[in-house]
Structures are given as C-alpha cells and as structure tokens.
Image: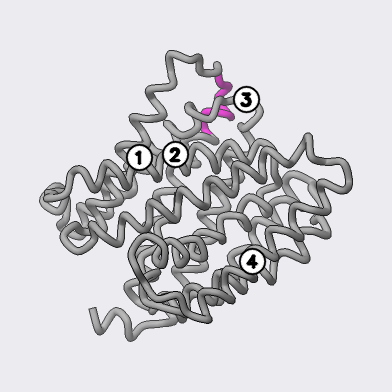
Amino acid sequence: MQHEVARPMTGILLRLLSGVLFTGMMVCIKAVSTVAPVGQTVFFRSAFALLPIVVFLALRGEFPRGLATRRPAGHLMRSGLGAAAMFASFAALAYLPVAEATLLAQLTPVLMALGGVLLLGERFSLCRGAALALALGGVGVLIVPGLEAGAAGGRLPGYVLGLLAALLSAAALLTVRRISRTETPGAIAFYFVLVTTLAGLATAPLGWASLTGTELGLLILSGLFGGSAHIAMTLALRYAEASRLAPFEYVALIWPVLADLLIFGVALSSGFLLALPLVLGGAVLAAFEGRSFKRPLRQ
C-alpha cells in the first residue's frame, strides 16, 4: 500500500478520469430520463456496471475468492441504502441540469461527517461545523433563487430528490465504514451493484419503456461508464490520499457544466454559480478533516 500512496500524480489523473466517466454516465441517464422509467434506468446502469467491475476484480485475483463475506446483513443494509440513493439521484436528473444534480451530490461527505457525530459518537469539531455551514449556505443560494423566480414547479422536486440522494448516500457510506473492517472493497462494490440490479429489475412489472437502439445504447453506456468510474476512483484513492484529491472536486465539476452547455444547451443559473464555492468548500473541509473519507463510492 505504501508504494501506491507514494504516486500522487497517478492518483490525481485517475481522479480526473473518474470525473469524466461519471459525467458520461450522468449525461446518458439525463438523455433518456424523459423516456425510460427510473427503475429501468437503474437496472441497466447497474447490470452493465457489473462487467468492468468483475473484469477488474478478476485481474486482481479477487474474483470470486474476494467476494466471501462475514457480514451479509451489513452488505444488505449498505446496498439497500445505496439503491435508494441511486433511485433518488436518477429521478432528480429528470428535473435538474447535470451540473446542479452533481453539485448536490457533493453534500454527501458533509452529511457523512455530521452522521459520524450523531450516529457513531465522533467528536464534533470546528472543521465539521464550518463544512456543514458552508454546505447549508450553498444549498440555500442554489434553491432560493429558483423558488423566487417561480420555478418551484419545475426544479423543486429535483432539489428535494437530490438532497434525499445525498442523505441516503451518506448513510450508505457510514455503513461501509462499519463493514469495511472485515469486508474487501471489491465485495462491497460487487454486492451493491448486484442488489441495485435486482432492485431495478423488480420494477419491470410496473412497466418499462420500449426503447430505440440509441436509447438502449445510452443506458448500456451509463452502466459501463459508471462501473469504470468506480474503478478509477478506487484506484485513485489507493495511489493518493483523500486530502490530496479533495481539491480536484472543483475540476470534476467542469465536465457537468460543459455537458449542460454543449449537449443540453442549459445555461448556468446564478444560484449554481453562487452555490458552487460554498458546497465544494464544505465538501473539501469535510474530506480534509479526517480519514473517514478515504473510500467514497460513486452511485
């Protein structure tokens, strides 16, 4: 592990790559959000994410040997919370631009820090308090202008779903912290994707959409991008410490902004521009504050 941590530039490049791949996933999901139900989207994103994850684990000699578990209930709880977060975040994309949905996801480490205090008995530090204040301020300046402009009917459900997704993701990651003492990262990732695949499949009786070849291709790509983004992030955190990678959350948001401008033709709102430094500042403070965010996992 030590020789991996000593390669920060490799970790930074992998973090940047994960941001590009994650944005590619979001763009694919946003493109089909008016056609495919959320459950159908979750199924394809999860099922095809299994492919790169299984290949990665096999190359590392961790498949299937590394999938043995002593905490099946812990995996079920983590995966259930993560699946609920995925449903909420994908539903939010139907209402919000990619950049705003991605920004709300940055609340996860802040909420995780707060959850550590409330649920795990961790110390409430000044750094955590500042991170929470910045994040809440960012959410306020993102949402309030839209409400004052009469856009509540359009974006308010997206803001609520995005906040719910961040809260559920934080709860899922707190569960990861507990089970990671005995479970491997590969097993945690595999069982999460497996459960979300089954959760998405369970919605099929509710009615899935008939897709064109292009729409089907976009859903398949969302899974391949999502699984690959997870691998890139996992490797980045093995080569460089979380505190060194945290500032590159700013760079990662360039890609969703460009996607909104160049692909969907959505201009940046004033609320987003004001919220950006506040929310990311809170996320960076939370990541710097402790070592509990060394293994964040993307939905």
Judging from the image, what secondary structure is the residue with disc 1 in?
helix
Q: Earlier in the sequence, mark 4 or mark 3?
A: 3
Residue type at numbered disc 1: Gly
Of 32 and 116, nearer the camera is 116
Mark 2: few/some/many CA within 10 Å (<14, 14-19, 20+): some
- Mark 4, residue position: 279
- Mark 3, residue position: 35
Residue 229 is left or right of residue 120, and the answer is: right
Judging from the image, what secondary structure is the residue with disc 2 in?
helix
Q: Is residue 285 magenta?
A: no
Residue type at numbered disc 3: Val
Dot in front, 3 or 2 = 2
Q: CA distance from mark 4 to mark 3?
A: 31 Å
- Mark 2, residue position: 84
Residue type at numbered disc 4: Val
Mark linked to residue 108 = none
